[in-house]
Amino acid sequence: MGSLQGQNVVVVGGSRGVGRSIAEAALGEGATVLAVARGEQALAEFAWETSGIKTLAVDATVDSAPDQVFAALEPDVLVICAGALPPAAPVHELSWEAFSANWETDVKASFLFCRAALRRPLKPGSRIVLISSGAALSGGPPFCGGYAGAKRMQMFLAGYSQKESDRLGLDLRFMDLAPMRIMPGTGVGKAGIDGFENYAGIRPADFIAAMADMQTPADVGRAVVALATGKSQGSSFMVSGSGLAPAG
């Protein structure tokens, strides 16, 4: 029997990359899994390729998105992995629209779903995991606009939400998880590697060869399952090739 048998898992941003790996990991542990994303085609491909996965096409940055998602499947575990590709240009070359892309997507989706989890509220014992980034801890490269700050804000938001759950006696568990290394096979990872090439002239093959302790999307999926089923203390975590660990 899987560790998530009988549990409902909702992955927002679950159609591809890290989000898809999280959904696959939860499905492999016996959960009923709903993958939520904007792109209908990617969701259709996921459903075609993966027996048992449920899908829902919703823009997670729309105010009504949490109600639509919770009506489709009330989660025991809610994972927010939705995000925009970060910009890849020095700050002085960016428009505000480009600079703030990750605030308007990653942070806004996290805010809307955390707020809804507290207001509804989700049933006691529910776990909410926000997928952040190692850039939130390192500051990220100087060509990624507001990406690092947005991912740090997700960490703050998980902490704020946990304090409100505790204050209101809701028995919800809010956590954030930061993959520590760029993952070349994902859209965000490719954008980052291309950014280093354009900004610093580092060839992608050389950049990847120099990386150590890399986690994979599958590692992130396993880490989310561990957080959803374990008794780890604290709210902030990181995952690398060495595994899951507290952040800070």
Image (cartoon, helix red, strand yellow):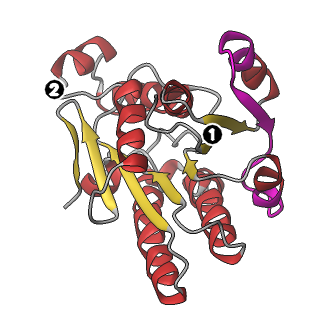
Q: Which residues are magenta?
A: 45-67
Q: Which residue is mark 2?
A: 212
Work out whether 44 lies above or below 23.
above
Residue 113 pos. (x, y %): 65, 62
Residue in front for this viewpoint, 99 or 65: 65
Q: Which residue is mark 1?
A: 13
Q: Is residue 143 left or right of residue 56?
A: left
Check the picture and name the quadrant holding the C terminus.
bottom left
Residue in front for this viewpoint, 87 or 163: 163
Residue 56 is covered by the magenta coloring:
yes
Badge 1, how many Cα within 10 Å: few under 14, some, many 20+?
many
- Residue at 48 percent of width and 57 percent of height: 146
First of labels 1, 2 by sequence position: 1
- Residue at 21 percent of width and 29 percent of height: 241
Work out whether 126 lies above or below 160.
above
Residue in front for this viewpoint, 194 or 184: 184
Identity of the residue furthest to the bottom in this view: 167
Residue in front for this viewpoint, 77 or 42: 77
Q: Is residue 23 left or right of residue 49?
A: left
- Residue at 60 percent of width and 66 percent of height: 114
Check disc 2 and report its element: helix, strand or loop. loop
Work out whether 240 lies above or below 77.
above
Q: Amino acid at mark 1?
A: Gly
- Is label 1 or label 2 in front? 1
Residue 138 pos. (x, y %): 25, 53
Residue 125 is covered by the magenta coloring:
no
Q: Amino acid at mark 2?
A: Ala
Q: How many marks?
A: 2
